[in-house]
Structures are given as C-alpha cells and as structure tokens.
Image (tube, rainbow, N blue to C red):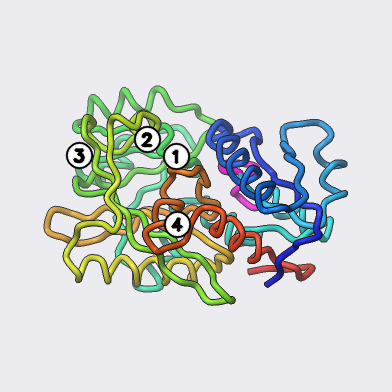
Amino acid sequence: MQSFESARIAVVSGGRSTERERSLLSGRAAGESLDRQGYTTRLLDPADKTFADDIRSADVAFLAIAGQYAEDGKLQGLLEHLSIPYTGSGVAASAVGMHKALAKTVVAAAGVAVLPTVTLPARSGDVSTHVTSTIAFPLILKPLSEGGSIGMTVCRDTAQLAAALRTIDPGERWFAEPFTTGIPVSCGVLEIDGSPVALPPLATIPTDAEFYDYATKRDKTKYRYECPANLFSPALDAITTATLTAHDALGCSGYSRSDFIVTPDGRPVWLEINTLPGLSHTGNLATMAAAAGIDYDQLIRMILATADTTEGYRP
C-alpha cells in the first residue's frame, strides 16, 4: 500500500463504452477529491487519440471509468504493458467479471446462490426455443458484457421474447435469466491494509418503475437508497458473505461491488460484480462508505492506496 503523495496521478475517465457519461461523472468527482487533498492529477480519456502517449507520463493510474474497453481487462492490459500501477482489479478478474455468465459460473462454484442462465447462441436459429427450454417466463434479457442495466428487457411471453430478440444486434452477445421480483441490494468491498472488508449493504427501492433499469438509475426521483439495507440479519449476513466470496473467487483486488436481488422470501441471489464501481458523490459505493464512517475524500484516498505496484501478472 502506498500513499502516492508525490506521484503524477492520471485520473482515467470517459472512454468509448455506453457508460461514458457515468464514467466522466466519476472521473470529475475523484479528480476534484484528489486535487483537494493536494495530489498532482491529470484527467485522461482513453477515447482521445493521444491517450496511449499521455498515459506514459503517469506514475499511477486512478481508474474512474466503466464499461467495455475499460472494465473488461483491455485497459488494464495496456497499463501492465507500460508497467504503470493502477487501481481496481487486474486483467483476468476484470475480463471474467465483465462477462456476466462466466462470472456467475465462477461465483456459483464458490458456493454463492445465483440464478440459472442461458447464453444466447451467436448462430442463427430458433433462439426463442433455446432460451425457453431452460428459462421459464417471465424472464429478462441482458447484454453479456454491459453495465449500468443497459439494454435489459423483461419478457413475459413468447411474443415479447420474439420482439426483444428482433432488436438485438447479431454481433452482440446476450443471456437470459429468470425475472425475479424483490429488492435490489448492492454490497461493496474495500481492501484496507490488504484485507477485503465488506461495506454496509445498500438497498435501492424503485418508486416508479417495474425494476431498477437503466432509465430508473438515471432519474433520482424514481428510487431511494436505504443504507444499511432494512433486511433481517440472516439476509444481511448472507449478502456480506457472498460479496466477500465473489470478490475472492473472481480474483478481484482493491475494491468491487456485488449486486443482488433479495427475493420476497428473504433469499439473496447474486447477479453480477462491478470491478470498477461508480465513484460519484451520491453513488452506491460512496453511500455505503459513508454508512461505514468513511467520507468521500477518505474513500478516494483509500482506493488510490490499493493501486498495484508490482509489474507483470495480477490475479
């Protein structure tokens, strides 16, 4: 763990994914915090043509970015090639964590409860039958490697499924899982002195939406946070244990955030992991940290301290 007090810090934000705007919000917030604390920073955007040259002057990269080409191991691979330490998980954990179906397989093997999954075939054919032979209605379609609830579609019958499938780009990969009603809950992990610590779980209660979808996430009038989540102790304990298990099983480092759905009977089911959670002042991770007594500047400083300083392979 290092403080990087005299380091040249590249706050990497933006990028080319569909989560660009959310990333820029995180980058501005994190960069302002680091500046406020006396660090030397420079905001860099991988979408800029000069990025590959500009990043070489950095002593450490603070990754305030999400989505494809950023959270999936590609950016991490470049930084390792350049021997630049960076925050967040390494290449393998980032790649597997971003592939939602594969991540569920790994986490389930570690004993965490997940929903059954069917990956839509890349080939043409009767995709509807392929899906419904395993997943009953209602079901939900999700992109295999997107974040922020982008593109999710609930299908309650064959007609809705067929209509949803017609809108999918043949070049994209998707998967289906049962649509399960319940309470969306997130739980963050922050490594402190090298040991992963679970933050208080946060429940997100939609106030005017069927589920916590992309549009709802971007309209603060449509949901409210509850942190710590108002759940019975067995569910809270199960979420905390599953979060730490997922972080470890996927080989994550620095910090992460796992998302769950708590079914009406109080059973938490793991949905996915974010290896680079959003870092806005009012986002999930900052809210959970605040509930643990960690203010925003302290959170950013603690994340910076987890930047890997070794060269070569990281889990």
Q: Are marks 2 and 1 in contact (CB under 8 Å)?
A: yes
Image coordinates of residue 80 in percent, x first then y, are 77, 59
Q: Which residue type does callout 3 highlight?
A: Pro
Between the residue at mark 4 and the residue at mark 2, the CA separation in whole angstroms equals: 16 Å
The dot on residue 217 is 2
Q: Is residue 237 above or below residue 36?
A: below
Q: Is residue 298 left or right of residue 104?
A: right
Provide the residue designation for mark 4.
257
Residue in view at x 46 percent, y 51 percent? 286
Provide the residue designation for mark 1.
148
Nearer to me, 20 or 43: 43
Provide the residue designation for mark 3.
138
Q: Are marks 1 and 4 in contact (CB under 8 Å)?
A: no
Residue in view at x 42 percent, y 63 percent? 293
Q: Quadrant location of the C terminus?
A: bottom right
Helix, strand or loop under label 4:
strand
Q: Is residue 211 visible?
A: yes
Q: Is residue 140 left or right of residue 60?
A: left
Helix, strand or loop under label 1:
loop
Which callout, 3 or 1, points at the residue further toward the start of the chain?
Answer: 3
